[in-house]
Image (cartoon, helix red, strand yellow):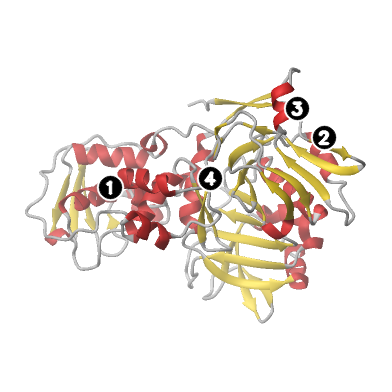
Amino acid sequence: MSSPVHSFTYLRPSALGAVDGSPSLGLQTCGGLGSRGLTPFPRFFSGFLTAPEAAAGGLLAVADVAAARYYQPLRPGSLDPVVTGNGDRLRFESFSACCGVHARLDVLPAGIDGEMFGTGTTNVDVNAPLREALARVGGADPLHLAVGPDDVTVTTFDGPVVEKKVPLPERWLRGFAEVQVISGGFDLRAEVGAGEAVRFLRALPRGSRQALWAVPAGRSLRLTARPVPGAVCLPGPDRLQALARLLRHALALRIYGPAVQARSTAVSSAWEVELPGMRLTLTLSPDPARGFSGEGAVLTGLASETSGADADLISALLAWEPRVEIGELAARSGLDTERVRAALVRLGTSGRIGYDVAEAAYYHRELPYDTGSVERMNPRLRDAHALVAAGAVTLTGGGGEASVRSGDRTYGLRLAGDGSCTCQWWAEYRGGRGPCKHLLATQIVRGRVGVDTGGGAIPGTASTTGTANGGATATAAQEANR
């Protein structure tokens, strides 16, 4: 299937120039939804970057990731990064073309000195001449930054516009949704100071795509080829190369991820470099050959049949906050925290929610793209609904087990904990890429009948309890090739 073509339209190219004899970085914007509604050329900020050389390096790192393809580098990516104005900060984000690396530069209140004109999300033009100019930024003098043209420019402009037409990969859009769910399960696992951060990152093996593990050792880190308790997975050291631009500005290195035990397979992790007034975070997929788009982390939340209506309610409570707290949303909406989380997952599928591991909080954004329907972007969910519609799910064992008839085969499922299935997908990934369609279909049915076997409701489903009286009659359903 060919990707839809997305057109970026800018009044002029972004450029590094001068205003009243001082260096000025003008980032041109292209469309987006914000506090002022839909705007063709939104304006978010005008003021100064207090650490210009570090900020230039951070912007280049985000652009490096957008232009990179770490797995099978046959062609460079060409998507312009997105920037979100969250009231007191600016967030620049991009994905690699292979969808395996997510980069985000957070320019915090301490890193900017100026006026925020609005909130919202838009694309910013990052062109080749601008990249060359940013690479030459140096010195300690403040750098003026304008994100978006001023209102006078917009109303008086009558010259030709700059237009880029590029394929917009659906995997890139799906990656935004997956990253916020996956990173929401991360904790801070290691932190080292500036000197050790530089030593560790410079010593990483070049050209390596294999998974390694970083082990905290006093105030330093050491690498090992095997997972051990307390280690942090580094799935493909080569994918941290965008951090090299920032080493001379690094104040600290923090690593986030899930708990890694002996015999664990490779998992995602996030690598954050603290900079003066800002931070750059790279989040890596579990394997260079795997993009985030197929990880399936969103599926359990989407299986909740209340998440659609709940998402509409939660959406009305969002106001471009730099920190979106689960507890506060639960109190304001009247929903329990699990339903709020499922609603945020659904909002994340359209790019409206991100997650900041440094603050352990969500944030509001609106991607300037048409993300399409949830089911079209998540084939396993679509297939699960087809199984439910066909009556293919039978709950047994008081709701703690199930059988699912799919095609000419019947699969057995155990539903305790994260669940398990006898299908080939489960045998291959063991839940490492989200639930299979059979488990998803069973979660949907359990949510409808309100089954709770004592271990609590399945995450993302309705939290009512009860006992199933019988079950759906098993019928044949068409097996999808996934």
Q: Amino acid at mark 3?
A: Arg
Q: Is residue 482 visible?
A: no
How far separated are the C-alphas under marks 1 and 4? 22 Å
**Could you say whether the residue bearing mark 3 is in a helix, strand or loop?**
loop
Residue 365 circle label? 4
Question: Counting residues from the N terminus, which is met first, the one under dot 1 or under dot 4?
Answer: 1
The first of marks 2 and 1 along the sequence is: 2
Helix, strand or loop for disc 2: helix
Q: Quadrant of the C terminus?
A: top left
List the residue tagged with mark 3: 12
Point out the frontmost of discs 3 and 2.
Answer: 3
Residue 283 sits in quarter? bottom right
Label 2 is placed on what type of residue?
Pro
Circle 2 residues within 10 Å: few <14, some 14–19, many ≥20: few
**Gap between marks 1 and 3, in whole Å?**
45 Å
Disc 4 marks a residue whose amino acid type is Arg
Do the residues bearing badges 3 and 2 touch, measured as CB atoms within 8 Å? no
> Measuring 71% from the left and 68% from the top, which residue is drawn there?
252
Secondary structure, mark 1, is: loop
The x and y percentages for residue 243 are 72, 56
- Determine whether the residue tagged by mark 4 lies in a helix, strand or loop: loop
The CA distance from mark 3 to mark 2 is 13 Å
Mark number displayed over residue 306: 1
| Label 3 close to label 4 by CB (< 8 Å) | no
Instruction: Indicate which disc, 3 or 4, sits on the residue closer to the N terminus.
Output: 3
Q: Earlier in the sequence, mark 1 or mark 3?
A: 3
Where is residue 311 drawn, in percent x and y? 36, 46
- Marks 1/3 in contact by CB < 8 Å: the verdict is no
